[in-house]
Image (cartoon, rainbow, N blue to C red):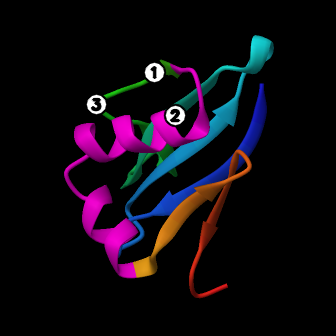
Amino acid sequence: MERLCEIHSDDRKRRVIFYKRLADSFSFVEEIWFENEYGEGWAFGKWPDSICDSLETALREARAQLDWLDAVISKEGFFVQNDELHNQSG
């Protein structure tokens, strides 16, 4: 799998990572930041994996499943072009 990009929540405590898989399929994984007495790091969120036919489909599915993501995408202006994720701010 090739890691393509990630989008963070406004508070930087959640992120979604998009991957290109073998056979031209795509997936995303939500992770949640944790801190406790044993350490800190990223852990899987509610939807550990999804397989999609395109990055655009993966982005659409992630928006539908992750309640925080739609607001971030709308605010930052993320869009897919040529199977790459871009945002309007650069």
Residue 50 shows which numbered tag? 1
- Give the residue type that dot 1 points to: Ser
For disc 2, the neighbor class at 10 Å (few under 14, some 14 to 19, many from 20) is: many
Look at the image and tell me in which quarter the N terminus lies.
top right
Asked if the residues shown at circle 1 and circle 3 are in contact, with their CB atoms under 8 angstroms apart, the answer is no
The answer to whether 12 appears left or right of 89 in the picture is left
The residue at the far front in this view is 82
For disc 3, the neighbor class at 10 Å (few under 14, some 14 to 19, many from 20) is: few
Given residues 31 and 19, the one toward you in this image is: 19
Residue tagged 2: 28
The residue at the far top in this view is 23
Asked if the residues shown at circle 2 and circle 1 are in contact, with their CB atoms under 8 angstroms apart, the answer is yes
- Give the residue type that dot 3 points to: Lys
- Give the residue type that dot 2 points to: Phe
Q: Earlier in the sequence, mark 2 or mark 1?
A: 2
- Magenta-drawn segment: 52-75
Residue 46 shows which numbered tag? 3
Residue 24's spot in the image, x, y percent?
A: 75, 20
